[in-house]
Amino acid sequence: MAEEDAIFPIGLGVEAARARIVEIAAKYTLPMEDVALERACGRVLARDVVAPLDVPGFLNSAMDGFAVRGADLPAAGEKSLRLIGAIFAGGREAPEVFADACVRITTGAPLPRGADTVVMKENTRVEGEQRVFVTAGTVPGANVRPAGEDFRAGVLALTRGIRLTPARLGALASFGFKAAQVVCRPRAVLLTTGDELVAPGQPLGFGQIHDSNRYSLGALLEQHGADLIRHERLRDDPDALRKALRSAGNDADLIVSSGGVSAGEADYLPKLVAEVGRVHFWKVRIKPGMPFLCGMVGNALVCALPGNPVSGVATFLTLVKPALDAMQGVSEAPTQLRARLQQPVRKSHARTELQRARLECDESGALWATSLKQQGSGMLRGVAEADALIVLPEAAREYAKGEVVGIVPLPGWPGV
């Protein structure tokens, strides 16, 4: 048995690893804050919202037309009504509708007293200034929206743990709220490690590469609700790494690192996390991304990702994103998407594999996934050109064309 195998619990399956990291992350209790609605899109609601009033607050018209009494509607042909006034959306006064009379009305305007029906403008004709002819076909009560049709005062309108979408922000605004009570964003520190890394814009020396993970992982953190309080680019130096881990453990709720987590001579993170904190598990039966480590340093959950760019994106979406959701108390389960394989796929190993793929929806509504040629874990092009990750579960096997597989949409795919 290798030395690291004796120190750390290793080799969890993907589902077990995800369940473990979610269990740990769910123990975090992040504070709440009030955020103005115009800045609250995507934030997680911290408390249930009960409708404080009826929406709409009054009986109103669903159409442009004429407000009438249902008793005055013709059974056949057409009937002449006297036009006695008008009311528009936002209007406060209108004459009471009496027998054989009508009031011109626009969509959203309050229904005048005496009226209970709106006849669409298209079903009328107007002669002069005071005569409206209504044709048969409208039923009593038509084209009228009751008070509280959308929300009744006292009903549970929005539940804690949901993400605030544009429509949900609109619902809060309809109640008269200017701000939402949301969960504070988890504070995150991103560490990208490796002697070979150089900041974009700087010249490359022999054996050096630009630090792309700072931007792909940083963007993923912010897109999924984290407040990225800082990024550090670190050399493969145990003292520098130890210092950075301790500092981040004091400042952050989540530490995400990239590189230095495998079993090479310069991969110091597994032993350093164990030294200054605790390792929950190391290595997951997943391709790409097997060296993923989950631990704790200070107050911060540690997610140490492999340095290869594709491995970083794959393990982030598979394991870090669920942890971020759990930290924020997200109550909505992610939609499980599936697609049919556009071509046969041969899987020759036992680990869960995440293959980069393009997606296409055919005329019947079926979603098809085409595995890309660029499947190397260091090939960013494969992710940049992909729409999703195909999920091939554990065990070696042959997948036939048309077989249904799970998919993980990549950010930027329509609807994500």
Image (spheres, rainbow, N blue to C red):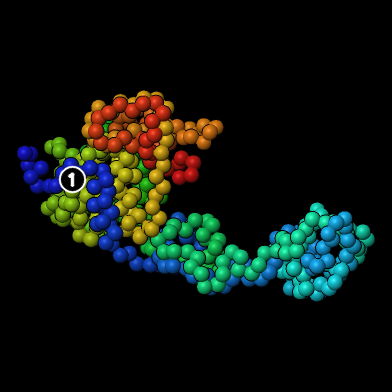
The furthest residue to the front: 75
Residue 95 position, x and y percent, is 81, 74
Closer to the camera in the image, 79 or 193:
79
Q: Residue at x 52, y 56 (%)?
A: 166
Q: Residue at x 39, y 49 (%)?
A: 334
Residue name at image x 80 percent, y 75 percent: 96
Q: Residues within 10 Å of mark 1 (few under 14, many from 20)?
A: many
Above-or-below relation of 134 to 380: below
Compared with 391, 276 (above or below) is: below
The quarter of the displayed image where residue 348 is located:
top left
Residue drawn 33% across the image and 41% down it: 313
The residue under label 1 is which amino acid type?
Answer: Trp
Q: Which residue is mark 1?
A: 282
Left/right of residue 184 with respect to residue 116 in the rendered view: left
From the viewer's perspective, is residue 50 above or below residue 333? below
Q: Quadrant of the C terminus?
A: top left
Residue 262 is left or right of residue 109, and the answer is left
Q: How many marks?
A: 1
User: Visible in this render: residue 88?
Assistant: no
Please tell me whether residue 74 is drawn above or below residue 282 in the rendered image.
Answer: below
* 42 and 250: which is toward the camera: 42
